[in-house]
Amino acid sequence: MTQRPYHIETMISAKAIAARIEDLAKEIRQAYRDTDKIVVVGLLRGSFVFIADLVRELEMNVEVDFLEASSYGSGTESSREVKILKDLRGPIEGRDVLVVEDIVDTGHTLSAVLKLLQSRNPRKLETIALLDKPARREVDLKATWTGFEIPDAFVVGYGIDFAQANRNLPFIGSVVFDDEVPEAGGKA
Ligand code: 5GP
């Protein structure tokens, strides 16, 4: 399948992401201050870079586990079934859990994941999302911590892909299709 030509415009620089993560890590440490150890649950695959940077800023005991929920195409149905493709390796009953998501968009994924994890009776269950697109929300939900609120654009980079490409970009950028870019200067 041929890909429509596109380019990527920087939305959030690597430097801005690093600074925000430092602040978020301080808030998280504070919120979990009476805890021995937290279980960081990363939602694959988009959050893998964010988790790697976040846990290195968390000066506390951390375990890392991963969960993969099914992603979906660009459909707009308001009720979607979210399937668990890869479950956690360890139990979370009685544990202090922090779920790490790349983007909260409609909210269906995080909502389904939280429902599942809550049923396993953790002691504490909080969430952090690097990005939030409030304009797209279909489920009433907000992560405990949010890195950046962004407009309704399709973003890539910093772990987040477009057709499996661009995950390795160190910044967050928006995908702009070349045939949608207005011509410079336009017509008189
Ligand atoms: P939600 O269930 O909140 O609608 O969707 C969350 C998931 O959709 C994210 O974890 C991510 O995988 C995907 N997603 C939402 N917005 C974007 C985007 O702008 N770019 C990419 N690559 N994935 C997105």
Image (cartoon, rainbow, N blue to C red):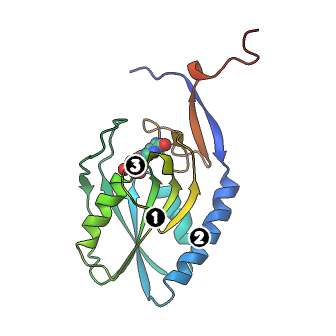
**Could you say which quadrant of the image residue 75 lies in?**
top left
Residue at 28% from the left image edge and 72% from the top image edge? 118
Q: Which residue is label 2 attached to? A: 24
Q: CA distance from mark 3 to mark 1?
A: 12 Å
Looking at the rendered image, the disc whose residue lies closer to the viewer, 1 or 2, is 1
Q: Is residue 28 left or right of residue 97?
A: right
Q: Which residue is label 3 attached to? A: 106
Residue 26: numbered disc: none
Say which quadrant the C terminus sits in. Answer: top right
Looking at the rendered structure, the secondary structure element under dot 1 is loop
Q: Position of residue 21 (x, y in %)?
A: 61, 65
Residue at 44% from the left image edge and 89% from the top image edge? 36
Residue neighbourhood size for the residue with mark 3, other residues' Cα within 10 Å, grouped as few (<14), some (14–19), many (≥20): many
Quick check: is the Cβ at mark 2 less than 8 Å away from ligand 1?
no
Q: Is residue 79 left or right of residue 99?
A: left
Work out whether 161 lies above or below 39.
above
Residue type at mark 1 is Ala
Residue type at mark 2 is Leu
Q: Position of residue 13 (x, y in %)?
A: 68, 50
Identify which residue, 29 or 65, lies in the foreground.
29
Q: Is residue 3 left or right of residue 88?
A: right
Residue type at mark 3 is Thr
Q: CA distance from mark 2 to mark 3?
A: 23 Å
Identify which residue, 21 or 75, lies in the foreground.
75
Q: Is residue 48 visible?
A: yes
Looking at the rendered structure, the secondary structure element under dot 3 is loop
**Could you say which quadrant of the image residue 87 lies in?**
bottom left
Looking at the rendered structure, the secondary structure element under dot 2 is helix
Q: Which residue is label 1 attached to? A: 143
Residue at 57% from the left image edge and 49% from the top image edge? 150
Residue neighbourhood size for the residue with mark 2, other residues' Cα within 10 Å, grouped as few (<14), some (14–19), many (≥20): many
Residue at 66% from the left image edge and 41% from the top image edge? 10
